[in-house]
Image (cartoon, rainbow, N blue to C red):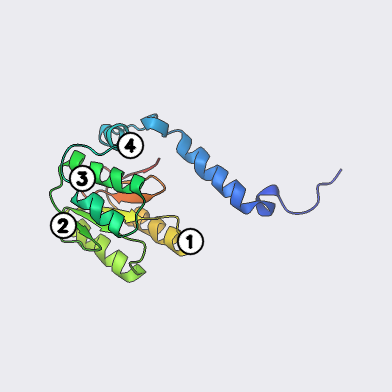
Amino acid sequence: MKIVGHPISFRLPGRVSELRNRLSRARYFRGHGVHSPFVYDIVRRVFMRDDLLPGRRDLYEALLTAGVSRRRAVQLQNLMIHCGYTTFGLNRADAEFCVATCGLPRPATLALVRAAAEAGHTVALMSPYDGCERQALCGQIVAEHASTTVDNRGYLLIFNNHLPKQHFRI
């Protein structure tokens, strides 16, 4: 019997791509399969926490004001505390920890990522899966980046430090 029509992936594009996305990330669930001690530590001590670490709350409050979900704001504030960053900038590259919101246009986002790379600052690119253009932009940034990147669905972390070129999808 001949199978007619398009493959199932064409008939159910949203469901199949979501399933592929989840399966590719499954190996890094809770840090399993992450062979970088630095990234493993971030997964266990930052991504898996629901509460704020003791310390400053200024990034957390700025992200909530910018419309970022509480969960992502907690994670990014905890990352800032965990990594020892003292300054942050929303849509600016002049701080140790730069957060590029979804509303930042493509040329400005690329300029921010370049400036942060030159200065050795870490970037959190919010909403990497918010449309095809945003996905393409994030893919381009990851392909051109010389150090470690971590994608956890809500934001793409771009580290500009001594780490080797690796990409983790958590």
> x, y percentage for residue 163?
23, 42
Pinpoint residue 66: horizontal percent, then vertical percent: 30, 60
Left or right side of 7 for 109: left
Do the residues bearing badges 3 and 1 touch, measured as CB atoms within 8 Å?
Answer: no
Q: Nearer the viewer, mark 4 or mark 2?
A: 4
- Mark nearer the N terminus (3 vs 2): 3
Query: Which numbered dot is residue 147?
Result: none
Q: Residue furthest top?
A: 32
Q: Are marks 3 and 2 in contact (CB under 8 Å)?
A: no
Residue at the spot of label 1: 131
Q: Amino acid at mark 3?
A: Met
| Residue 69 visible somewhere in the drawing | yes
Residue type at numbered disc 4: Asp
Distance in Å between CA atoms under marks 3 and 1? 27 Å
Q: Secondary structure at mark 3?
A: helix
User: Which numbered circle lies on residue 95?
Assistant: 2
Q: Residue furthest left?
A: 86
Q: Residues within 10 Å of mark 4 (few under 14, many from 20)?
A: few
Of 93 and 59, which appears nearest the observer?
59
The tally of labels here is 4
**Label 1's element?**
loop
Dot 4 or dot 1, earlier in sequence:
4
Q: Please state which amino acid type lies under the numbered disc 2.
A: Ala
Q: Nearer the viewer, mark 4 or mark 1?
A: 4
Q: Quadrant of residue 51?
A: top left
Considering only order in the chain, which callout, 1 or 3, is on the residue closer to the N terminus?
A: 3
Q: Disc 4 vs disc 2: Cβ atoms closer than 8 Å?
A: no
Question: Quick one: label 4 or label 3, which is nearer the N terminus?
Answer: 4
Of circles 3 and 1, the one toward us is: 3
Q: Which residue is mark 4?
A: 50
Q: Which residue is mark 3?
A: 80
